[in-house]
Amino acid sequence: MYTMYTKLCLVCLIVPYLHAVLSHPCSISEDQRTADCTYRHLTRVPLLSNLTEHLDLTGNNFTRLWNYSFDHLPLLRTLKLDSCNIDRMEGQVFGSLIYLESLSLSNNRINILHKRFGRLRFHNNPSLTNLDISFNTEAVLKQIESVYPHKVFASMTSLEQLTIDLLPNPVFKQGFRKMTNLTSLIFRDCTIMHLKNDTFRYFQNLTSLTSLEMSGCQVHIQPWFKVETAVLQYFSSLQILNLSRSMITFPVAMDILYGLTVTSNGKYSARKMKVLDLYNVNPLKLLWLYGVSYSVKVTKFMTRYLQQLCVEDFNIGKNGIVEIDVESVQEFRNINCLTRFVMRENNFILPFPKFLFIVVHFISHATNLQEFDYSYIAMQFSDVTNQSPGDLRSNENRYNGFSVMDTTHHLSVKEEDSRCMVPLASANLSVLRLSHLLFPFFFLCDVDVSMCPKLTHCDFSYTSISTMDFKVKGANLSYIDVSGIDFSTSGSRLLGSFIHVGHLAIRDANLDRAFSNNNYIFRNICHVEELDISSNHLNTLSDEALEGLESLRNINLALNFLEEFPHGIYKMTQLREIDLSYNKLSFFDKNTREWLDGRKEATGSNITVLLYGNPLACNCDTFDFVSWMMTTHNVRFDNSRNYNCTLKYGSTASIKHVYEHRDTYFADCNDHLFWLQFSISAISLLTLALVLAVIGHTFRWRILYFFYRNCKIKSGFEDTTSYSFDLFVAYTAADSPWIWQQLRPTMELQHSLHLCLHERNFEVGESISQNIVNCLQKSKKILFIISQDYINARWCDFELEMANMERVQRGGTNSIIVAIKGEIPVEDMPRPIRTIWQHVTCIIYPSDTTDRDALELFWCRLHHSVIS
């Protein structure tokens, strides 16, 4: 009795546990410390092991969380509750999670301004360092204040990173003073209406707060919109400020930098900043909706607060800047702090060459500058496109008193080739981006970068200069991108200066025309290891075109028109990867396969070949290639070798499937079936002879027609001016009402075309077959009304066969038009139609005859097909 009772108790305890394990909706790690319960349609927190430390509940439907919801997970460290439709939480819902470090509640329906949220407390979460409650409160564009529940945030004394929404007219009260460990404040779902000078006054003592992100802030044009200039004055330790994509206008962004140059007492102080990101702060799209013009001229006055800042990473890209005052650059102080400077995607209209030398001077004096991005800028200078070097030197006063000959401290003219030199000196510059620039003039100077010993990365891609006949001297680059430059006419001098480059990108450069002009641009480059020459219209690659690339490890030939493997690659003994994606390769020949297999022995590792997007073939001629691809262990392919290939009769199948069923697909390719094939062929010939004899007797009139046509027509093409009818119409009696009520009125009465209809135009006394032949010869185009009745008609195949013969006699012209009425499967189409499908014009009559647009389109296409 006691034993039975004990067993019953054990069963009662084990069964629920087994049910929970076997039917658990979550993905749990082996050590039971991590549980992934995302998008499981859960309405309550699942029962998990009490060892769980990391739990992701994103995308469920909890609606409400109770105080006891997480009591069974005491060791939880990270908890994600994003997008769970949560709109209510009890005050101590997280009170049992004393080890909780990271909590994410973004994209829910928690209104942080509601009194329910104000009851939430985190006093029992001493380890909580990261909290995300963004995208929870919808912004209401009103002048009333949005008061944040400061008591909730006052309980987060250990918090280091806070991600929250910035609401219109925000009010942060004294509870935020207690967040002394906060280092990063991120505003998501940011809406700016009025930011006052004292908005952040309770952040004054948060000395650990070094990062503020207000990116992507929306600004609505309202009369009360305002951002006051000293709004940032209480962030005394701020080192990272991200205002990117906030539509506050670039001048406003520069004005609020004032708050970083003063303390709360109004005294000036120098400020070192790691990041100042002002990328795309212009409201161009918003202003365009209201018809407001917007452009920015950077002046010395606008940049006055930058004089008090020492910025390492400075980004002013995509701000509608149309002009930069030279003085604003000359007066830029503390440039020794700069390590990265981004000016891309603006609309500069700058004086040349004065501003060029200011930029060169700026880079030279920014001794710590590591990256300079001057890309995507349409630059327009004085018109010197038609001047020769002699004209340029003779016009010394052309640029407002600033000429090439006046700048001897910048340029040194070489008498032997009459070229000038622009020196670029920067001890730490490593990345230089000059991509997508427009220079509508001749650049007559070389660039000397020998005083930039760390310069390793240059991007000149898609930069348009009237001539690219210049050099970059002293370069020791590891990466260079010159894509988009037309190497069919220029560029060889530029490329010849990069003899030590390791990675070369030269996409979209018209290399097909360069090679056809015997401009073999790679001969002087001996150390390239990675080469990208994709998208260059290459349909062949000669051995000479690849000379100088013997050290290559990776080559990208994708998006070209190569029909065979380039044999010049055989000389590249160090090659590890070949990208031949999206070309026109159907197979590899025997020499190519043997060379690829030999790479394993030569280099000690497999070579990788990318072939996705090629029209590979599976037929008797490529059987060896298919077998090699599926069996070789010396070559790695992309797409798990599961390419599609074209079969003998035009259909497609995967190479894996074809190889696995090779006895079926390649049965007629084996030598041991020769005698069987011979026997079958002999029997087939005898049968064919018998069939031909029967057909010759039964259909002798067709044979006579064929010889009649061949004897009658001397030239290969018909004289189109001798036709009596514009269109011969083949149809059945069932379609006769449609012909006379719709086709004839539309084509004859509206479009003045002369139709040949058998009920009207067949001659009395002649046989039907003779009438059909005569009318086909007299008609410029032939129209078949294909319906189910027509397919079953007696004369269907005859008319189609005769029409095809007539088409051939006319030189293969597209004289046959097919109009399909009704739903007819492909396999039910007449055989003569299927055999010449690529030579006919097909038009489908709409099934919904009430659709006037579809009917009108049908008649329009039919008329166009007849007269074209």
Image: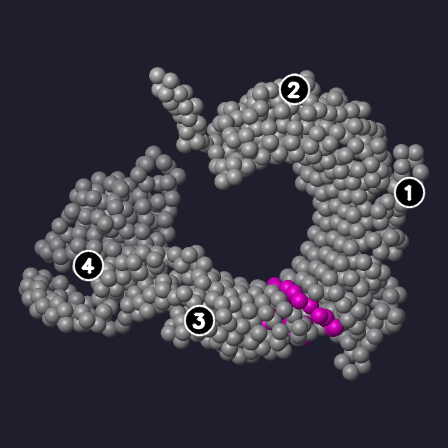
Tell me if 666 is positioned left or right of 692 in this view: right
State how far apart marks 1 and 4 are (Cα): 94 Å
Is there a contact, CB below 8 Å, between mark 2 and mark 3? no
State how far apart marks 1 and 3 are (Cα): 66 Å
Tell me if 309 is positioned left or right of 429 in this view: right
Tell me the residue at 28%/56% (across/down).
837
Give the residue pinned by disc 3: 596
Give the residue pinned by disc 1: 269
Is 516 or 644 nearer to us in this picture? 644
Residue 801: mark: 4
Q: Amino acid at mark 3?
A: Leu
User: Looking at the image, is 219 positioned above or below residue 640?
Assistant: above
SS at mark 4 in the image: helix
The earlier-in-sequence mark between 4 and 2 is 2
Is 703 or 145 nearer to us in this picture? 145
Report the predominant secondary structure element of the magenta stretch.
loop
Q: Amino acid at mark 2?
A: Gly
State how far apart marks 3 and 4 are (Cα): 50 Å
Q: Does the magenta run of residues contain 484?
A: yes
User: Looking at the image, is 357 positioned above or below residue 137?
Assistant: below
Is there a contact, CB below 8 Å, between mark 3 and mark 4? no
The earlier-in-sequence mark between 1 and 4 is 1
Tell me the residue at 23%/45% (across/down).
787
